[in-house]
Amino acid sequence: MQYIFDGTYNGFLCCVFEYFEYKDSNVQLQVEGDDATQTFLFDSDKSIITDLVKAKRVQTGLQKHLGKSIAMDFFRVFLSEDRKAWAASFNIICQIFSGKTNILGNYGSEEVLYFKQTLKKVSRERHRMKAFIRFSRSSDGMFFAVIEPDFNVLPLITTFFKNRYADQKWLIYDVKRKYGLLYDKENVMEVKLSPEEKHALTTDTVITLDEKDEHFQNLWKRYYQSTNIEARRNMKLHLQYVPKRYWKYLVEKQV
C-alpha cells in the first residue's frame, strides 16, 4: 500500500494515524507531485488527507511515549527532506505505538541508525546556520539574509534569531526552498516572495542598501583579515569548520 500525502509534517503524522486506523500492511510513503513517485504493479494507492486533529493526536501520543524533546526529533529528521529518513521515521513511530518504546536505543537496526545519523546532520546544519548567517541592512532599515542550507532548517532557527535580534526587523530567505521568515519586532511569519521580490533580494544591484552597510562590511572584512595569521593557516581544518558551499553568503569571503 502506498500512502500519498502532501509532503508536510502534519500530513506525515496523518499517515501514521491512517496506518493504525485501517491496519494496512507494507506501507510506503509517497509525496504528491514527487518526481520519485513510482507505481508498483500490485500495489494500491491511498491519498492521505491532512487533518490537523489527527496529526495532533499522533504528536501528543509520541510525546507521552518519548517526552517532548525526543518526540521533536522526528520533526527535525522530517526537515531533512530525505525520503529514506521519512520511511525510517514512519516505521520507528509505528513500532513505538505498537509497544516497542525502547526502539530508538537499538542501534543494530538500520532504520534507527539512519534516523540518528540524519538527526545529527540536521542538527549540524542548524548550528552552522546560526553561525554563518550574515545580515545586510536595506535603506528602509530592514535586515535581510539569503541562505541556501542543505536541509530545511529555517523552523529550527526561528527562536534563536527572534531572541537575538528582538529589537530589529529582519528577513531570512531560503532561496533553495523559496520561502522565508519575516520578523516585525513582534511576530515571526512565513513569507513567500514574488519572482520580482526574490530577484531584488538576491541581486545587490536592485535592492538599495543602507549607506553605512558597505562601511560595516568593509570593517568586518578588515577585522577578519587582521586576525588571520598566515603562518598558522590550515585550509583543510578551515574547510572542515566552514565548508566552501557557505562562502558565497559570508561577507568576509567576498572579494
Image: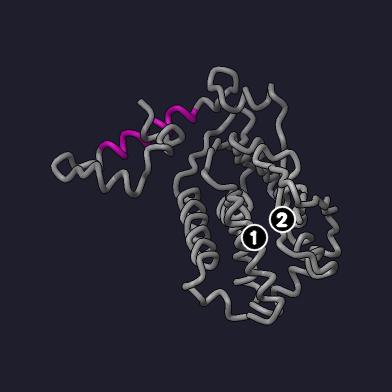
Tell whether label 2 touches label 1 (CB within 8 Å).
Answer: yes
Residue that extends furthest to the top in the rendered view of this protein: 205
Q: Nearer the viewer, residue 224 or 38?
A: 38
Using the image as rendered, state which of residue 9 and residue 172 is in the foreground: 9
The three-letter amino acid code for the residue at tag 2 is Tyr
Count of numbered marks: 2
Residue 130 can be seen in this image: yes
Q: Where is residue 135 drawn, in percent x and y?
A: 52, 38
* Image location of residue 29, percent across then percent down: 70, 53
- Position of residue 27 in the picture relative to residue 111 (left or right): right
* Callout 1 crowding tier (Cα within 10 Å): few <14, some 14–19, many ≥20: many
Quadrant, the C terminus: top left
Please tell me in which quadrant of the rendered image residue 32 appears: top right
Relative vertical location of residue 99 with respect to residue 57 in this rendering, above or below: below
Tag shown at residue 219 = none
The residue under the point 46% across, 55% down is 124
Start-end of magenta stretch: 212-225
Residue appearing at x 43%, y 39% in the figure: 246
Name the residue that disc number 2 marks. Answer: 9
